[in-house]
Image: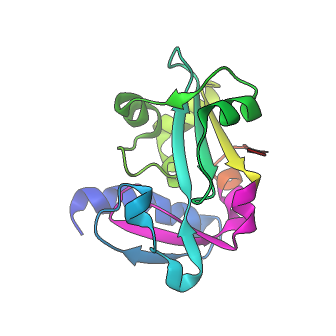
Amino acid sequence: MEDSVVSAERPALEALENAGIDYIRISHPQAVTMELCRGIGAEYGAAHCKNLFLTNKRGDDFRLLLMDPEKPFRTSEVSRALGVTRMSFASEESLGRVMGLVPGAVTVMGLVNASAKKAYEEGRLHIVIDEDLFKRERICVHPNHSGASLVLKTEDLPKLIRSLGYEAKVIRI
């Protein structure tokens, strides 16, 4: 692995280990879209979680939304479920600044980054999970880069998020 990939991944793996969460690591070619992620983890009964980084019109309020991969994303439904004005996809610049991530590697594991923690503490970042995701026993997430995936038990998501000092809101979309 190249140094930048290792440096991006190491904090994610350490966070899982510190929280006592078991995972399986899968190396694969860059998978930057849900289409490219399709099938990754299937041998473990897992599918890639749909991770969306959203913002309001002003670009000062952000949501990291975790959804079932088969569920369609509809801006109006998500905004209504969140009780906020219309959300849209955040810019690449905002993703880097707030989550410390690049497009194609949006993941709950980005919460290990100091920039995400700062945005959360300032009330600008909120973590949201669609309740239908919990119908899956296992999911895959990227470890802060798109050249690997981590298989996790879905029930461990809240534990991971809390262990990193965040609270997530579970919603119905």
Quick check: can you spot residue 108? no
Please name the residue shown 40% across and 31% down the image.
97
Residue 9 spot, x, y in % from top left? 39, 61
Residue range in magenta is 132-160
Query: The C terminus appears in which quarter of the rendering?
Result: top right
Residue 24 spot, x, y in % from top left? 51, 78
| Position of 60 relative to 165 (above/below) | above
Query: The N terminus appears in which quarter of the rendering?
Result: bottom left
Q: Quadrant of residue 128?
A: top right
Is residue 143 magenta-colored?
yes
Q: 172 or 138: which is nearer to us?
A: 172
Residue 145 spot, x, y in % from top left? 36, 57
Residue 82 horizontal side relative to residue 24, left or right: right
Quick check: can you spot residue 130? yes
Q: Quadrant of residue 31?
A: bottom left
Residue 173 horizontal side relative to residue 54, left or right: right
